[in-house]
Image (tube, grey):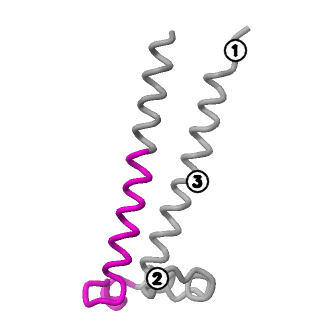
């Protein structure tokens, strides 16, 4: 039973290291690409994505980058990390609860 908990915690720790390092790498790439000729073109992406980008919430309140597509991807990545954090926290609490 103890080995199983150590294996689960090791897998959980590895998953979080990969998630956070991927997020940091994505932010570094966005910083390097933002404002250059490499950033995505709004006209080529499509109508649905363009309407989301032109929404006032992303253009007024969330201005991490000059390109609105980078802002949307950043928000989705942050939400992904938050939801998985809550799930993993509840899972760890469930595993630590003693069985009667």
Determine which of the numbered discs, if any, sits on residue 29 in the image. none
Q: Residue at x 61, y 23 (%)?
A: 95
Indicate which disc, 2 or 1, sits on the residue closer to the N terminus: 2
Q: Residue at x 32, y 71 (%)?
A: 29
Q: Are marks 2 and 1 in contact (CB under 8 Å)?
A: no
| Extreme residue toward the right, this view | 100
Few, some or many C-alpha atoms within 10 Å of disc 3 (few <14, some 14-19, many ≥20)? Answer: few
Q: Total number of numbered labels?
A: 3
- The spot of residue 99 in percent (x, y) is 69, 11
Tell me the CA gap for discs 3 and 2. Answer: 21 Å
Q: Main secondary structure of the magenta part?
A: helix
Q: Which residue is mark 1?
A: 98
Q: Which residue is mark 2?
A: 65
Few, some or many C-alpha atoms within 10 Å of disc 2 (few <14, some 14-19, many ≥20)? Answer: some
Foreground pick, 14 / 94:
14
- The spot of residue 68 in percent (x, y) is 46, 83
Q: Which residue is mark 3?
A: 82
Q: Which residues are magenta?
A: 17-46
Q: Secondary structure at mark 3?
A: helix
């Amino acid at each position: 039973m103890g080995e199983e908990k150590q294996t689960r915690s090791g897998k959980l720790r590895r998953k979080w290291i990969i998630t956070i390092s991927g997020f940091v790498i994505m932010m570094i790439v966005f910083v390097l690409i933002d404002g250059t000729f490499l950033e995505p073109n709004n006209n080529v992406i499509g109508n649905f994505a363009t309407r989301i980008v032109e929404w006032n919430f992303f253009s007024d309140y969330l201005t991490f980058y000059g390109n609105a597509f980078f802002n949307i991807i950043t928000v989705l990545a942050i939400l992904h990390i938050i939801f998985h954090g809550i799930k993993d926290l509840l899972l760890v609490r469930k595993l630590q609860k003693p069985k009667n």
